[in-house]
Amino acid sequence: MSRYALFLHDSAGTFKTMSPEQMQKVIEKYVAWGDRLRKAGRLEGGQKLADEPGRVMRGQNGQIRITDGPYSETKEVLGGYYIVAAGTYDEAVDLARDCPHLEYGGTIEVREIDSMDQ
């Protein structure tokens, strides 16, 4: 079975406007979704990323440029990720279909992880 990364992007800023009580209910939905996948043997890991934007490193002509991330030209934020086990891309998409992230206007990028075991 292959492994897939589900990258959770948010461009709506929905979570920033929620009260602590609303946010707690959202967190409970994510936990329940993750628990269901974990019990099915499909969830291998995942984490919410810190709200701090991180750094972006770019190399060109032997020089490294470091900027506050992720990208100054976009408002989209990578907020977290999950690693799931699935047989195909379609199966990985089906596992992500009921992720609470989509309920709140987020985007999920599904990418197969290359095992590099050859």
Image (cartoon, grey):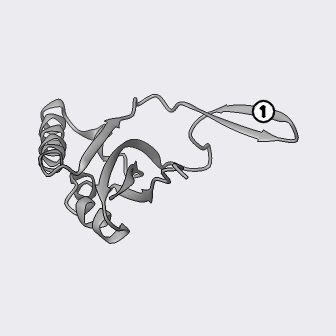
**Which residue corresponds to mark 1?**
64
Q: Which percent across, then down, holds residue 11?
A: 42, 51
- Seen in the image, is 41 located left or right of residue 54? left
Q: Quadrant of residue 25?
A: top left
Identify the image quadrant of the N terminus.
bottom left
Task: Give me the residue at 16% from left, 48% from top.
Answer: 33
The residue at 40%/59% (across/down) is 110
Residue 98 position by quadrant: bottom left
Give the percent coordinates (x, y) of residue 104.
Answer: 25, 54
**Left or right: where does residue 88 sit relative to residue 20?**
right
**Circle 1 SS class:** strand
- Which residue corresponds to the image point at 39% horizontal and 41% vertical from the top-left? 79
Position of 112 relative to 59 (above/below): below
Compared with 67, 72 (above or below) is below
Report the amino acid beneath label 1. Ile
Query: In the current view of this chain or complex, which residue is farthest to the right?
Result: 61
